[in-house]
Amino acid sequence: MTLETVAIIIGVSDYLQKDITSLPGAEIDAVNFCRSLRNWGVPEENILLILNEEVNAETVDNILNLVAERNKKYKLIFYFCGHGYRSKGKMPKSYLVFYDSLINSDDYSKSFSLDCFLERIARMNILESYIFIDACHLRINTFTNPIPIRC
């Protein structure tokens, strides 16, 4: 049985908040990863590529909901390239920073908690997931399905 592959690719090079440093390579890396997936046989209609100002919490939430509605089992590839942010305090959390995210504040509503994101992925109807996150200042606080991998 061959499983269908669905890919969500996000690249954020520019940010609305002016004191967030731009990452010119993030968009390029996301586009190149998208091209690689097509070259490896993932159908173009199964690849969702969103870049820069398209990347906001509402859009990512809608895409995750759309992918989660799939009835048949599938493989998920998730790729994020952009900034990460770690909150302050006794129990800091890691966030994926989107185009319109605010950092250095207590408002994380325009970002995604990495732990919550991974929990959402774990609840999807997937048999395999491959998650690539290229962002500094992130740490996973909890593991939803800690399966040891032996190399």
Image (tube, helix red, strand yellow):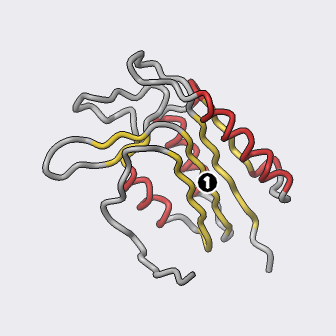
The relative height of residue 59 versus residue 79 in the rendered view (above or below) is above
Q: Which residue lies furthest to the left in this view?
A: 90
Residue 119 falls left or right of residue 70: left
Q: Which residue is drawn at 24% across and 28% down?
A: 105
Residue 140 falls left or right of residue 120: left
> Residue 56, how many percent across, how many down?
49, 32
How many numbered marks have been drawn onto this rendered protein structure? 1
The relative height of residue 116 versus residue 130 in the rendered view (above or below) is above
* Quarter of the N terminus within the rendering: bottom right
Q: How crowded is mark 1: few (under 14 residues within 10 Å), some or many (20 or more)?
A: many
The relative height of residue 17 versus residue 25 in the rendered view (above or below) is above
Residue 55 falls left or right of residue 110: right
Q: Choose top left, top right, bottom left or bottom right for residue 24.
A: top right
Disc 1: which residue: 67
Of residues 56 and 123, which is closer to you in this image? 56
> Residue 125, how many percent across, how many down?
58, 68
Q: Which residue is drawn at 83% across and 53% down?
A: 43
> Residue 35, how many percent across, how many down?
80, 45
Tag 1: amino acid: Val
Of residues 22 and 92, which is closer to you in this image? 22
Q: Residue at x 37, y 45 (%)?
A: 137
